[in-house]
Image (cartoon, grey):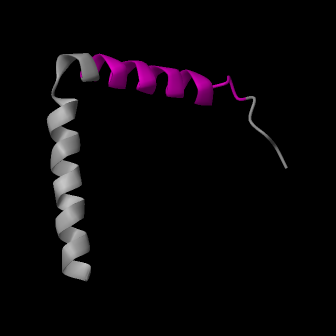
Amino acid sequence: MGMMRKLIASGVAAKVFQEAKKPQNQAKIKKFISDFQKKNSGGGKGRMR
């Protein structure tokens, strides 16, 4: 069962890398990363305990 899980995971990873090489997906990835960085860099306004 563990070997089957590794085989499926490697197949999924290969598909993700294939899709990431496409120009339209690269633009989406760059936008996502930019938005994520903007959201997380709130100027030091994080929750303090």
Q: Residue at x 60, y 30 (%)?
A: 40
Residue closest to the far right: 49
Q: Is residue 49 left or right of residue 46?
A: right
Image quarter (top left, top right, bottom left or bottom right) of the N terminus: bottom left
Read off the magenta span: 26-44
For the residue pair 21 and 43, the one nearer the viewer reads as 21
Task: Tell me residue 36's x, y (percent).
Answer: 52, 28
Q: Is residue 23 above or below residue 10?
A: above
Q: Residue at x 18, y 59 (%)?
A: 10
Q: Is the magenta region chiefly helix, strand or loop?
A: helix
Q: Is residue 40 above or below residue 3?
A: above
Q: Is residue 1 left or right of residue 18?
A: right
Residue closest to the far bottom: 1
Task: Tell me residue 27's x, y (percent).
Answer: 30, 16
Verify whether residue 27 appears in magenta: yes
Q: Is residue 33 above or below residue 27?
A: below
Q: Is residue 41 left or right of residue 17?
A: right
For the residue pair 45 and 27, the one nearer the viewer reads as 27
